[in-house]
Image (cartoon, grey):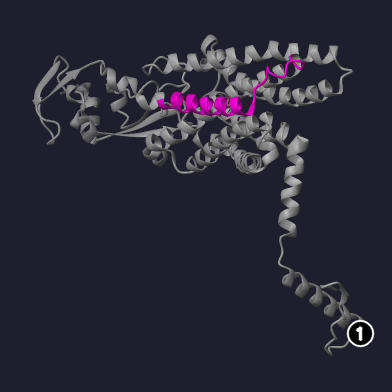
Amino acid sequence: MKLRRLKEIRGVTWNKHCLNCKLVRNYTFQNEDLKKRDINISVSQLVKGVYISGKKFNCRVNRLVVNESLVNYAKHGFFPLCLEEEHSACLKSEVRVTPVHRCWDLDNKILNVVYFTSPIALVLNLTVVLVSLTTKVLRRNVTMLLTSSMAASDLLVSVYSIILITARKMPYVEYLVYLEGLCNALGFMWLTGQIVTYKTSLWLTIERFLAIVYCMEPSVRITRGRAVTLIVFTWCLGLAVATLPLAKISVYTSNTYCVPIRPIRDIPHSYEMSIALSVWGMLVYFTIIPLYIKIFISVTKTSEQAGIRRDGSVAKKIAILVMSNMVFFFLPVVIGFLWLTTNLKYTMSPQNREILTGVIPTLLFSFNAFINPLLYAFRAEKFQEAIKMRFDTICLRKPRAESCSTCYSNYANSEKKRSGSLAPTPLPKPHREGSTSRF
């Protein structure tokens, strides 16, 4: 190997996995499969023994530890060609590859905010769903019926956020072991929730539009039966779209957030699906805007009618809910657009880039699920009355014997304190009113 004019050494064997290998001097690494995984191996890198392989602007890189035999060959300028063979056993035995996420700890510290928003969002949305479906008046109200469907989708997003952030507490290498099975479940919940949310925003807008603009035509309405049909259709659509990545049309495992949105063409169909979902959502929300313009024009023209004012007040609350969903939908889309059309990925540090493209969208989705029930359901008078009625029912649902016992105990204690004596205090005589005894 010390001979300067020597270019190749053939038939070299140094362990059971590296048999009859050819050593080539000044060789350029050409394994495309490894390059796709950001694993680069060259003579100059093998000399180091331990090095990081990956793009400088990526948080996800690989740490390579090289055995002494390869280091010795590299020091003389030789590269073993058997490392480039597909599924090379020699490569696996001589080079230990460990995935590294340089932004993992920083991302998780910021994502701790989700531990505050998502559990509260879970409780709020679950309350909306249960109260709406178990209260007769609310079940008959089309707006509350559609709102409860949106609350169910936000419930899925809340569960997704809690499980994801909890799973990310484990070391990155351990997280990768569970990534495929975990991401398929979490991504399915996330995508279903997103589809249902912005489709339900459209149905809520159309329901208010028909109730106000066509207020003199009662037949032009979304009835309860039609609302149930739209809800079933929306959930079936959401579940069908969420199944596509499981059918190898895009994937849920392209990032550590289990989201099938990836504006890069390195995974088959992922780019097309990302664009399709973004454009679909934009068309839905751009359809909503002119409808609300027409709604508020109609409310302004007929402001003297009490019924229209009441419907307009409901429409205003729904508009705030829908516009909030629109804002939280468009912000990640804008971030993705800037990522594709500018040099952000080259000018930003890996940590800032990961925060912009991964952490911030996750926080936005979590916060959106948190504020949605507060923007309409908990502001609706009928829902507030239903909550109050449930609360009163729970508080008054005590056995009478327990109430009497508690009353006597409190009376006896007060008498002891007043007299300072430990002698038993006689029970006060009950006042009779018919057949009912009261203290």
Q: Which residue is mark 1?
A: 419
Image quarter hosting the N terminus? top left
Instruction: Give how far across and how far down residue 385 sits, in percent.
Output: 77, 42
Q: To which quarter of the image does residue 356 belong?
A: top right
Q: Is residue 196 above or below residue 286?
A: below
Quarter of the image for residue 12 reads top left
Tell me what residue is drawn at x 61 percent, y 31 percent: 150
Q: What residue sits 79% from the left and 22% below the top?
A: 312
Instruction: Give the main secondary structure, helix, strand or loop, of the magenta stretch.
Output: helix
Q: In the rendering, at what x and y percent does residue 67 appear?
A: 25, 35
| Residue at x-position 73% and y-position 45% | 387
Q: Looking at the image, is 400 positioned above or below residue 45? A: below
Left or right position of 223 against 385: left
Quadrant of the snapshot with the C terminus: bottom right
Residues shaded magenta: 214-243
| Left or right, residue 165 beside residue 176 | right
Q: Give the camera-side residue of 343 and 189.
A: 189
- For image coordinates 65% across by 36% down, the residue present is 139
- 161 in magenta: no
In this rendering, position of residue 398 left or right of residue 413: left
Residue at the far bottom: name it. 423
Is residue 355 visible to the viewer in this orientation of the structure? no
- Farthest residue, direction right: 418
